Image (cartoon, rainbow, N blue to C red):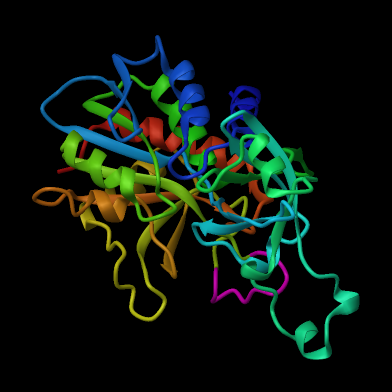
Amino acid sequence: MADELLELLKRLSQAHGPPGQEDEVADIVISELKGHVDEVFRDSFGNVIARKGSGEKSLMIAAHMDEIALIVKSIDGKGFIRFAKLGGIWDQLLVGQHVVIHGSKGRVRGVIGSKAVHVMKEDERRQLLTYDKMFIDVGAKSASEVKEMGVEIGDFITIDKPFIQLANSLVAGKAFDDRAGCAALIQAVKQAEPNCKVYAVFTVQEEVGLRGATVSGYAVKPTVGIAVDVTIAGDHPGMEAHEAPVKVGGGPVILAADGRRDSLGGGLIPNPKVKRWIMSVAEKLKIPFQLEVLEGGTTDATAIHLSREGVPSGVISIPTRYIHTFQEILSMEDLERLTSLLKGLMESGVPV
């Protein structure tokens, strides 16, 4: 399974899927699942929904297909492109990145530029460089030349990064948030012999407000919901253990609570039965796991658990370094363990 999972993660990571244009990722998901599930289709919102197994009770497991990205906001007379952000991006990471603009005539490549540090005034050098002071250079000499390339306002922009294998089973790449979750879910549902009706849902537009999970959770009406995502690994310089105790290589992460940094509002307090069920299946399968209280973020489970009359829900995550950058790092051992845990949950039946 290891080589197959690695290759699948690589393909998913290198695909481009900004919020609202996840088609390239969806095509991979559907091609992987055809012939391995009872049904797979895209809903009217763009989510990919795969069904496998039967029974009165149902388990929905969601992983999102979209990635943090940019969108064309304006094009000046000299052909330089200004942009807005789609999802939470630390502005400092953007300068110098290679980008792909998804225009009407195909992909247009460019580089994010800014004023050279050499000509900045002293007070400018001390300030954080914000995205509104940056621009994309595609080599054009005028706005009309940019438009001839097929680029216009509203076109999506993604960052282009390679997939790299590192030491100790670690890998680096873009969009592991949440293509890693997609890879594990694909493999798990392909291998599982479910003890209930399982819906593997690959959602859209998570990075801009959990939108795909909101509509798919309502449509699927699951008995239990689980989101699969990445979470912050703090096992590197600059992080104190109390800030992010999760470690790469320590196994999948089972959520205890998440939400806003100041209050844990707007997030998820997992259903206790669902949390204990996930933990018990992991223990039965001898899969090491970590527990987490996450301040400052949430997942698709927050949308799912508020669907209709309410859905008992939980979250399982992959510990990942440098999330919401464009070169995240995770352990393939953790991803394999997550796949085994998801398969075990599908085969054990729902707890409520």
Identify the residue shown where x is 88% and y is 78%.
119
Q: Relative to 166, is 113 above or below?
A: below
Instruction: Residue at 59% x, 74% y: name it.
Output: 241
Q: Is 50 placed left or right of 309 in the picture?
A: right
The foreground one among 282 and 153 is 153
Image quadrant in which you'd find residue 237: bottom right
Q: Main secondary structure of the magenta part?
A: loop
Nearest the viewer among 165 and 339 is 165
Q: Residue at x 21, y 26 (%)?
A: 196
Q: Which residues are magenta?
A: 235-244
- Across and down, in percent, residue 54 comes to 19, 20
Residue 130 among those drawn in magenta:
no
Front position in the image: 231 or 352: 231
Of residues 259 and 59, the one nearer the viewer is: 259
266 over 26 or under it: above or below: below
Q: Is residue 340 above or below residue 74?
A: above
Q: Residue at x 69, y 64 (%)?
A: 134
Coordinates of residue 350 in the picture (x, y in percent): 21, 37
Toward which corner of the image does residue 202 lie, by quadrant? top left
Give the left or right position of residue 191, taking residue 122 as reference. Answer: left
Q: Which residue in the rendered view is the most extreme toward the bottom? A: 123
Q: In x, y percent, where is residue 165?
A: 76, 38
Let me know if residue 222 appears in the view: no
- In screen coordinates, is 207 left or right of 227? right
Q: For the C terminus, give its image quadrant.
A: top left
Q: Position of residue 39 (x, y in %)?
A: 29, 16
